[in-house]
C-alpha cells in the first residue's frame, strides 16, 4: 500500500477515534430519588392534671403539655371522712398520628386490704371525655370512636347497688375492671395532615378517673394505668 | 489509474466527514457529575453518584424516613453538577413520578429544589465578562434554609419539584469552557449545586419516587 494511502488511513482513524471519544460526553444526566413514610403515632401529655373532690393528696407529678405522659396522683382519703361525692382526676392526653390509630389501656389495682371491701378495679371509675381535633394541621374532619362511656361520675354511668349498697360504675367500660388487659378505649382516623413534627397541635381528650368515697377496708391502694397508641 | 483516483477521492471524503464529526463533537455541550453528592439529616437514607467530575451524572437519592420518626429538621441533599460548553447554553430539568393521589401524601411541592453555588471547575473554565450565568427564577435558593410554614401548617419552599413543568429551564449563560476539548477534563467548565430538601412531616405512609433528567442544550445567544 502506498505510503500516502497509509497516512491518510491513519489520519482518518485518528479523527474517527477522536470523534468517537467525543461521544463520551453527554447532554443529559439523571437523578432518581425515593423517600419512605412509615406509620407514626404518639401519645403525650395534653397538659396539667385536674384533681377535684380530694381530701388530702394532690398531684405528685403533673403532666407537662407535649411531653411524655408520666403522671402521678395521690387521690388522698377515700374513706367516709371524705364527704365529697367523688374524687376525680382528669388527665389530658394528646395523640398525633399520620394513620388511623387505636388507643388502648391496661390497668392494675393493688390494695393492702384483704377483704372484698378493699378498693378493687371495679371501684375506680374511668372514661374518656370530649375528643377535640382542633388547630392548624389537624385533620379536623377525622372521626373517632370512644369505646368508654365518658365521664364516670355522670349519673347514667353508675349508681348504688340496691343489694350490696356499694356504689358501682355500671356503664360499658366505665371502670378499670374492664381494662385488666390491654383494651381499646378510643380509635379513629389519621389525626395530623402533612405538617412537620414541630407543629404542636393534635387530638386532645381527657381521661377521667373517679372513686366514690365509701366504707372501704382501710389500707393503701395503688392504681397503675398504661396507655398505648398504635397504628394497625 | 482510475482506481487510484477513486481511492483518493473516497479517502478525501472520509477525511472531510471525520473532520466534520470531530468539529461538531468539539462544539458539544456536556453535563456530568460535579463530584460526590452529600446527604444530611437522613434516617436510613443515602445518596450515590460519581465522585469524579469526568463521570456521568447518575445520582440515586434515598431520602430515607421522612415521617416524624425522623426528628431532624430537614433532609438535605447536595448534588454537584459539572457543565461544559464552548457556546451559550441552557440547562433544563424534567421530572417523572411522584404522583400521589392523596393530598396528604408526599407531593412534588414537598421536595424543595434549588440551584446554588456556581463555581469554576479549574483553570480551563471560561470566565465571561459580558454575560453571567443566570439561575432562572424561582430556583436561585437553598430550599433547606429558605423553607417556610404555609397557612395550612405544611412546609413550603420558594421552589420545589412542583416548580417543574415539562422541561423547565433552570439555568442559562455564556460558554463555560476555555478550551475546545473533545472530551471531559477535570478543569474545563463550571460546577453548580442542585440542592434538594425534604422536611419530615406527618405524610400519609408509603414509598414515593421520582426521576429528574437534566439536559444541557444550546441556550440564548449571549456574548462572553
Image: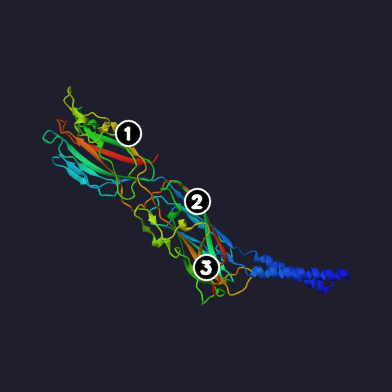
Horizontal side of A156 relative to B74 (left or right) equals left
**Which residue in the structure is indicated by mark 1?**
A181
B29 or A25: nearer the eye? Answer: B29
Name of the residue lying farthest toward the top: A163
**Which residue in the structure is indicated by mark 3?**
B172
Instruction: Give the crowd class for mark 1: few <14, some 14-19, many >=20 residues within 10 Å.
Output: few
Horizontal side of A167 relative to A31 (left or right) equals left
Same chain? Circles 1 and 3: no
Mark 1 chain: A
Instruction: Give the crowd class for mark 3: few <14, some 14-19, many >=20 residues within 10 Å.
Output: many
**Image disc number at residue B209:** 2
B15 or A108: nearer the eye? Answer: B15
Q: Quadrant of residue A220?
A: top left
Mark 3 chain: B
Residue displayed at 76% across by 68% down: B14
Q: Could you tell me which quadrant the C terminus of chain A lies in? A: top left
Q: How far separated are the C-alphas under marks 1 and 3?
A: 66 Å
Q: Tell me the mark number nearer the camera, choosing from 3 and 2.
A: 3
Where does residue A27 sit, x and y in percent of width and height?
59, 63
Name of the residue lying farthest toward the right: B1
Mark 2 chain: B
Amino acid at each position: 500500500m502506498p505510503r500516502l494511502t497509509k497516512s491518510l488511513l491513519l489520519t482518518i482513524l485518528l479523527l474517527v477515534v477522536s470523534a468517537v471519544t467525543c461521544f463520551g460526553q453527554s447532554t443529559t444526566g439523571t437523578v432518581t430519588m425515593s423517600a419512605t413514610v412509615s406509620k407514626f403515632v404518639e401519645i403525650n401529655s395534653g397538659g396539667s392534671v385536674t384533681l377535684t373532690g380530694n381530701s388530702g393528696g394532690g398531684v405528685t407529678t403533673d403532666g407537662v403539655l407535649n411531653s411524655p405522659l408520666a403522671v402521678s396522683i395521690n387521690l388522698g382519703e377515700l374513706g367516709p371522712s371524705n364527704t365529697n361525692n367523688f374524687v376525680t382526676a382528669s388527665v389530658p392526653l394528646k395523640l398525633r398520628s399520620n394513620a388511623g390509630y387505636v388507643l388502648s389501656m391496661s390497668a392494675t389495682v393493688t390494695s393492702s386490704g384483704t377483704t372484698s371491701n378493699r378498693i378493687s378495679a371495679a371501684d375506680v371509675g374511668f372514661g374518656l371525655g370530649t375528643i377535640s381535633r382542633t388547630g392548624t394541621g389537624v385533620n379536623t374532619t377525622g372521626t373517632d370512636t370512644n369505646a368508654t362511656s365518658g365521664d364516670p361520675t355522670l349519673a347514667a354511668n353508675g349508681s348504688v347497688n340496691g343489694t350490696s349498697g356499694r356504689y358501682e360504675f355500671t356503664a360499658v367500660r366505665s371502670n378499670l375492671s374492664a381494662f385488666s388487659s390491654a383494651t381499646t378505649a378510643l380509635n379513629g382516623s389519621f389525626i395530623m395532615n402533612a405538617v412537620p413534627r414541630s407543629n404542636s397541635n393534635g387530638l386532645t381528650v381527657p381521661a377521667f378517673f373517679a372513686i366514690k368515697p365509701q366504707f372501704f377496708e382501710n389500707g393503701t391502694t395503688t392504681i397503675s394505668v398504661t396507655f398505648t397508641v398504635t397504628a394497625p | 489509474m482510475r482506481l487510484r483516483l477513486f481511492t483518493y477521492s473516497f479517502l478525501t471524503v472520509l477525511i472531510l466527514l471525520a473532520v466534520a464529526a470531530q468539529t461538531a463533537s468539539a462544539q458539544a455541550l456536556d453535563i456530568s457529575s460535579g463530584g460526590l453528592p452529600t446527604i444530611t439529616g437522613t434516617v436510613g437514607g443515602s445518596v450515590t453518584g460519581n465522585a469524579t467530575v469526568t463521570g456521568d451524572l447518575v445520582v440515586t437519592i434515598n431520602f430515607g424516613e421522612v415521617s416524624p420518626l425522623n426528628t431532624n429538621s430537614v433532609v438535605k441533599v447536595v448534588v454537584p453538577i459539572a457543565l461544559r460548553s464552548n457556546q451559550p447554553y441552557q440547562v433544563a430539568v424534567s421530572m417523572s413520578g411522584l404522583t400521589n393521589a392523596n393530598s396528604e401524601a408526599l407531593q412534588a411541592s414537598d421536595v424543595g429544589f434549588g440551584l446554588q453555588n456556581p463555581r469554576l471547575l479549574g483553570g480551563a473554565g471560561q470566565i465571561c465578562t459580558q454575560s453571567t450565568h443566570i439561575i432562572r427564577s424561582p430556583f436561585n435558593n437553598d430550599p433547606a434554609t429558605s423553607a417556610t410554614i404555609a397557612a395550612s401548617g405544611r412546609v413550603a419552599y420558594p421552589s420545589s419539584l412542583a416548580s417543574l413543568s415539562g422541561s423547565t429551564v433552570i439555568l442559562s449563560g455564556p460558554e463555560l469552557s476555555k478550551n475546545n476539548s473533545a472530551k471531559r477534563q477535570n478543569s474545563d467548565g463550571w460546577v453548580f449545586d442542585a440542592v434538594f430538601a425534604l422536611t419530615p412531616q406527618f405524610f400519609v405512609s408509603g414509598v414515593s419516587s421520582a426521576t429528574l433528567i437534566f439536559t444541557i442544550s444550546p441556550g440564548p445567544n449571549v456574548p462572553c
